[in-house]
Image: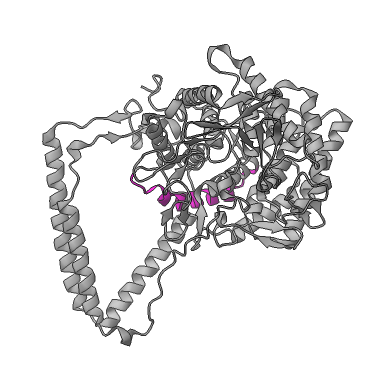
């Protein structure tokens, strides 16, 4: 699911800030300063900064150090005798004052020594000629470039790959179902082939204009979002020639060292998730290497006072910021809460616990915070650590946070009980305050805004039917049957939102006010942009119930997409699902290939293709294997101690 905050039709998009370097005069004569004097200015600034750091050193006796201490559990291929921490220690309290004073004195002495060393080096530098200084600067620059190249080429540690089951096949026995699956595969080829011809290397495709398309979630660079997003769909459909074309483009062209500001959330779920899935399915190392390179570029986004990441980060400078409209500079729950799956796999594959620690820190912070009525607001200020506007939604801005709590538990082979508890607590509060039944008997999920329930449900929230079904097994008080039925009720409501339109495609959001039920009222909510959430729920309900209605509903949606969204140059969203002569928006979203067509293909496949006890799908439908490791993501589990 992609939060509406980030969509081109949301009406809330703002152009990315220009964070590039300022323009300075290139003529040295205009500066009227000698290079030596400039060096002295830099030196004085450095010394001032160091002395400032000296006087404002934090009193470490007032702080406790948080340490998860689970690297040797999460990363089993690292030799515990070579520096792995004791897994029994996950919270270290400050020792006696004497040790703190010694530590502070050691730091002061180190700073003094650094000052003296820097001063001596500066004096030596100033004795040299301009040509010598230039040569040294160039040497240092060359050294940095070589180190960066060496780092990129450095092989990652060998990792014990989980037992990968069901990565191909899935042929249905029924001939009619097999034909439907082949039709979905043909639709995928139509979407891919036209992107290959008209949009290759661009992030997305404008199928009517027949040219590349992009939005600011991908920044200003051509990063081939559709290629990365579609890879695993191509692979499981057996389109291996197309898969190899995508792989070659990634090997030759995918570069993250660009001066481009991107959405951390979108790049994580589409690029890192897509690359990791392609790696696990194909075994090609290039995908793992590219995923790690990109992940390193996202880490500066976490450099906030609270550790809650910025929404946007510049891949080159590491400068981060939040969306201007997001509740006084807040970060968004569905964005910073939808990193866990990918980041745990990054730590597993690299042997580096930094990714795991980032997402576990977010979890720990959220656990300490008060929640109004047990609900998580959609906005959290990364500077103050306080909630923003009290707005709770299981649709846009909140959706995938709840999904990832459940999937963290599933991905850990059901050992991450902390994540499961957070999920259960959240779902109970949601059911109590947000889930209602309309006068016509339709179950819907409303939105909580400042103490008031808005009787409106978004297309994005329709994923929750599948989530409730997926989380039924393992629920509290033996309520598995209840949650499976709740998932079925949500699926029925979302099907009604499709069935009550002229095109049999669902609107962006729909209301339940009086006589109006499951229908969009505002013109700005009547569009369909090839979204997958309803079909996603059909697939999960099919897997858990094998009720034929879900395949029937899925086929109805596939036929509607084929009839109204297919154009000669690919597939396009439509602006009004209630108009029998729709206008196209001329965008083939990357998630159409990653999610919508993949879920349709799986819906008409047998259950042995990507079985759910071995694979967990990220929120962009990229399958990642269950890590059958005890306590992979659980801090404080008694078994670890």
Along the line of sight, the residue nearer the viewer: 410 or 134: 410
Residue 259 is at least partly visible in this image: yes
Residue with the most extreme top position: 477
**Residue extending furthest toward the bottom:** 29
**What's the image's color scheme?**
one colour
Which image quadrant: the C terminus? top left
Number of numbered discs overlaid on the protein picture: 0
Return the x and y of residue 500 as percentages of the image width and height.
77, 35
Q: Left or right of 301: which side holds 627?
A: right
Q: Relative to the observer, which residue lies in front, 40 or 309?
A: 309
Which residue occupies the extreme front position in the image?
Answer: 514
Taking depth in this image into account, of 306 and 637 the one nearest to the observer is 306
- How far from the left and from the top, in percent, is residue 477? 54, 12
Q: Is residue 586 above or below residue 333?
A: below
Is residue 621 positioned above or below 217 on the image?
above
Question: In the image, 172: left or right of 447?
Answer: right
Q: Which residue occupies the foreground of this view, 490 or 249?
A: 490
Asked if the stretch drawn in magenta spans residue 288, the answer is yes
Residue 539 seen in the figure: no
Q: Quadrant of the N terminus?
A: top right
Q: Main secondary structure of the magenta part?
A: helix
Start-end of magenta stretch = 282-305
Q: Position of residue 318 (x, y in %)?
A: 42, 56
Seen in the image, is 468 located left or right of residue 140? right
On the rendered structure, is 573 left or right of 124? Answer: right
Q: Residue furthest right?
A: 175
Q: Position of residue 458 (x, y in %)?
A: 63, 38
Q: Quadrant of residue 130?
A: bottom left
Q: Is residue 388 magenta?
A: no
């Amino acid at each position: 699911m992609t939060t509406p905050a980030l969509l081109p039709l949301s009406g809330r998009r703002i152009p990315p800030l220009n964070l590039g370097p300022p323009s300075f005069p290139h003529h040295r004569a205009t500066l009227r300063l000698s290079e030596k004097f400039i060096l002295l200015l830099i030196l004085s600034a450095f010394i001032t900064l160091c002395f400032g750091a000296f006087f404002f050193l934090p009193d470490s006796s007032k702080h406790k150090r948080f340490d998860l201490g689970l690297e040797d559990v999460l990363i089993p291929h690292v030799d515990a005798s070579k520096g792995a921490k004791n897994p029994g220690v996950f919270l270290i309290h400050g020792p006696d004052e004497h040790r703190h004073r010694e530590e502070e004195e050691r730091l002061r002495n180190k700073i003094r020594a650094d000052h003296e060393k820097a001063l001596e080096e500066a004096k030596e530098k100033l004795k040299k000629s301009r040509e010598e200084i230039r040569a040294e600067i160039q040497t240092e620059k060359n050294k940095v470039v070589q180190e960066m190249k060496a780092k990129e080429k450095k092989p990652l540690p060998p990792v014990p790959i989980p037992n990968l089951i069901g990565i191909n096949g899935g042929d249905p026995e029924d001939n009619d179902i097999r034909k439907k699956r082949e039709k979905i595969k043909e639709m995928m080829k139509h979407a891919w082939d036209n992107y290959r011809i008209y949009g290759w290397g661009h992030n997305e495709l404008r199928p009517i204009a027949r040219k590349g398309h992009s939005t600011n979630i991908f920044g200003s660079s051509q990063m081939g979002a559709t290629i990365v997003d579609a890879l695993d769909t191509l692979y499981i459909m057996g389109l291996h020639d197309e898969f190899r074309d995508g792989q070659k483009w990634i090997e030759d062209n995918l570069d993250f060292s660009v001066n481009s500001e991107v959405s951390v959330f979108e790049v994580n779920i589409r690029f890192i998730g897509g690359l990791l899935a392609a790696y696990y399915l194909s075994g090609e190392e290039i995908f793992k290497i590219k995923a790690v390179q990109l992940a390193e570029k996202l880490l500066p986004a976490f450099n906030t006072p609270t550790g809650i990441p910025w929404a946007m980060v510049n891949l080159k400078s590491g400068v981060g910021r939040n969306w201007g409209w997001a509740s006084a500079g807040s970060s968004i729950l569905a964005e910073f809460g939808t990193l866990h799956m990918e980041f745990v796999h990054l730590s597993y594959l690299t042997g580096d616990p930094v990714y795991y620690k980032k997402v576990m820190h977010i979890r720990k912070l959220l656990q300490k915070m008060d929640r109004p009525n047990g609900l998580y607001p959609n906005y959290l200020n990364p500077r103050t650590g306080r909630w923003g506007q009290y707005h709770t939604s299981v649709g846009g801005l909140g959706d995938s946070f709840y999904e990832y709590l459940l999937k963290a538990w599933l991905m850990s082979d059901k050992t991450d009980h902390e994540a499961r508890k957070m999920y259960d607590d959240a779902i109970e509060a949601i059911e109590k305050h947000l889930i209602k039944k309309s006068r016509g008997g339709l179950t819907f999920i409303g939105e909580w805004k400042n103490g008031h329930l808005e009787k409106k449900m978004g297309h994005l929230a329709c994923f929750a039917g599948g989530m409730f079904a997926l989380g039924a097994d393992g629920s509290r008080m033996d309520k598995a049957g209840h949650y499976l039925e709740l998932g079925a009720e949500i699926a029925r409501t979302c099907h009604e939102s499709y069935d009550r339109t002229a095109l049999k495609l669902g609107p962006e959001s729909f209301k339940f006010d009086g006589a109006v039920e499951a229908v969009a009222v505002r013109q700005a909510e009547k569009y369909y942009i090839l979204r997958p959430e309803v079909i996603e729920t059909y697939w999960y309900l099919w897997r858990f119930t094998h009720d034929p209605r879900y395949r029937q509903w899925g086929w109805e949606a596939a036929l509607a997409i084929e009839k109204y969204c297919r154009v000669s140059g690919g597939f396009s969203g439509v602006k009004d699902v209630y108009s029998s002569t729709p206008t196209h928006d001329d965008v083939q979203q990357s998630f159409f290939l990653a999610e919508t067509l993949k879920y349709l293909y799986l819906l008409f496949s047998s259950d042995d293709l990507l079985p759910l006890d071995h694979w967990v799908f990220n929120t962009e439908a990229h399958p990642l294997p269950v890590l059958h490791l005890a306590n992979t993501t659980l801090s404080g589990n008694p078994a670890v101690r």
